[in-house]
Structure formats: structure tokens, C-alpha cells
Amino acid sequence: MGSHKVTITPLTEEDGTISYDLAISAGTRTTLKLYETLESAIDSFDPPLSARVRSHIVEGVRGEGKPVVFCLEDSFT
């Protein structure tokens, strides 16, 4: 079983709105998706992320305004 590196990055548009870039990397392959809300990016995982992981993502992205990087096992993608 392998792991995937996940990065959620807040992107500020010219009009001031924020969208969220979700990048999932496995080896040399990276999948990118753009979400209108942080919640929709977090909710896109199947199975769902734990409350603890969700909390860390929200704290990092909203509280610090920085990209959040974490790893998931194959069963999450």
C-alpha cells in the first residue's frame, strides 16, 4: 500500500475571492482540482477525512493562509 502527498493551497483571485487548489501526488503523477470553497475540497475525499485532519487543514489554510500538506494511504483515493 502506498501513500499520496496532498496539498491544499488557497488562491486569491483578482476580484478578492478565494478558491482552493487540491493537488494529489503519487510518484510522478499529480492530479489537480480547483474548488470554490475549502469545505468542498475537504469533502471530496472518499472515505471522508477524520475530524482531526479536517481541523488541521482549516487551521492551516484559514488561520495561517498557507498551503497545507499531508499524506494519505491508497485507500483514500
Image (cartoon, rainbow, N blue to C red):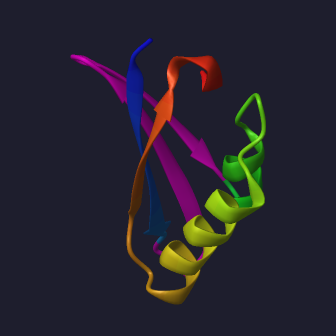
Residue found at x 44% / y 81%: 65
Tell me the quarter of the image containing the C terminus.
top right
Residue found at x 70% / y 35%: 45
Residue 5, located in which quarter of the rendered image? top left
Residue 36, located in which quarter of the rendered image? bottom right
Q: Is residue 7 above or below residue 66?
A: above
Q: Position of residue 62 (x, y in %)?
A: 57, 81
- Of residue 2 and residue 66, the one placed in the foreground of this image is 2
Residue found at x 76% / y 51%: 40
Residue 31, located in which quarter of the rendered image? top left
Q: Residue 37: tell me if it is visible.
A: no
Q: Position of residue 58 (x, y in %)?
A: 62, 72
Q: Residue 64: tell me if it is visible.
A: yes
Q: Is residue 72 above or below residue 19?
A: above
The stretch in magenta equals 14-35
Q: Is residue 36 above or below residue 47?
A: below
Q: Is residue 33 above or below residue 43?
A: above
